[in-house]
Image (spheres, rainbow, N blue to C red):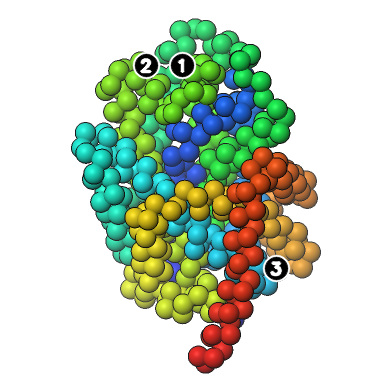
Amino acid sequence: MLTEPANAYARRLNTWDAAMIVIGGVIGAGIFITPATVAQNTSSGLQVLILWAIGGLLTLAGVLCYAELGARRPQAGGIYVYLREAFGLLPAFLFGWTMALINYPGSVAAVVTKFAVYFCRALGVSRLYELPVAVGAIVFIVGINLFGIRAGAWMQNIFTVLKVMAIALLVIAGMMLAHGHLGLVLAVDTTRPVSSWAFAGALLPVLFAYGGFHYLNDLAGEVRNPQRTLPRALGMGMVGVVVCYVLVNFAYLAGLGHAGLATSIAPAADLMQKLFGAHGATVIEVGIACSTFGYCSIAIAGGARVLQTMGADGVFFRATGRVDPRTRAPQIALAVLGLWAIVLTVSGSFNQLLNYTTVGEWLGHVFGIGTLFWYRKHFIDDPAPYRVPFYPLLPLIFVITVFGVIVASAIHAPGDAGMSLLIIALGVPVYYGWQWWSRRRS
């Protein structure tokens, strides 16, 4: 089964747009909240910084692998396309079933709800408006993306710049609060002994905060000169994210200390309020609202391309496989994903779904990177415009380390990991049921 032809999408994204998608797809709400969870599972500021550095380096290794995969197959759909070509349609469907139908819309619902909370809080309006604001944000994002990738890219670039400015403000505030006592950042918190399993398990929320770097590969069919642009944008964008994440955690530790970070519910707001009072907390709430809104825009755009590819392959509704010839946007797939995200937002069922699919997401990355070995074996003589350095070491490090983190997480939280595997397994009868139904209709 073939997807839409390569020219169904228009290549309108330049290197700047692509790098902004990488940064915007990774930086959402996680860096403003997750550091507290990481601190709770560590006993010193040094351990916190080590975890964020390890997560960043590991993600960079994965990004370099995705750069080669994207350069080899610059098509919409990303991991779904790689899995389909290397391992067949069923494994690709299981990834799409888990991600495009559950994780993508679930993450949009979760993040847009945080957007609404911070948006209403910054404006000082009642919490009664949070749900309408969240639904309105999804409708607005889908509406902009219906006009094509350029319209979505303009909006995304603006919000990515705003979220980077918010992170820069946090870093400045943390340094100002340190008062020259930066050595306290690395101090040990003797009141919080942590087991080695908890420390290893703390890498999963770090990886979750680094997640989203694959969205650019979902949009690879719309990148200009993809063999050059994809590796450059992925590398530039991810290096920028790692620098931002390590610096902002350093700022949290400098301003709040390890104990303060571990007990904080909203470390970004606490840091700004400590220095600037209530006005500081309001400013960072606006920054978080911009960050979460920008993430939702990328997740909807990327997820819709996966749905479109699945529809074109005949493993989802055929109508979603269409690309509008005028706007070059997968309008029906965008509408379906947006509507499903709204349903999850209104129902409030997204938090558990995200817990259940986080393991599945990173398993998808493990097998996605694993396709690189298949491509190297079966296309050994094909000219590759970009090759991941230190092959096969970097992909092996990524695959083995991430798989180890998944195992540690499963030991730490077996219920969530088990449900994740169950959701993936449920995709098998759905796939064969869909195939049977499609043949009967034909």
Give the mark toward the camera: 2 or 3.
2
Q: Which mark is residue 274?
A: 2
Q: Residues within 10 Å of mark 3 (few under 14, many from 20)?
A: some
Q: Give the quadrant of the N terminus.
A: bottom right
Indicate the secondary structure of the residue bearing disc 2. helix
Residue 118 in the image, given as x and y percentages of width and height: 32, 37
Q: Is residue 316 left or right of residue 390?
A: left
Q: Residue at x 29, y 28 (%)?
A: 282
Residue 58 in the image, given as x and y percentages of width and height: 66, 40
Is 228 above or below relative to 268?
Answer: below
Specify the amino acid type for callout 2: Lys
Dot 1 or dot 2, earlier in sequence: 1
Dot 1 or dot 3, earlier in sequence: 3
Q: Which mark is residue 255?
A: 1
Gap in angstroms between the C-alphas marked 1 and 3 = 48 Å
Residue 42 in the image, given as x and y percentages of width and height: 62, 25
Indicate the secondary structure of the residue bearing disc 3. helix
Q: Which residue is mark 3?
A: 86
Nearer to us in this view, 412 or 123: 412
Q: Are marks 1 and 2 in contact (CB under 8 Å)?
A: yes
* Residue found at the far front of this picture: 415
Q: Residue at x 38, y 31 (%)?
A: 166
Q: Residues within 10 Å of mark 1 (few under 14, many from 20)?
A: many
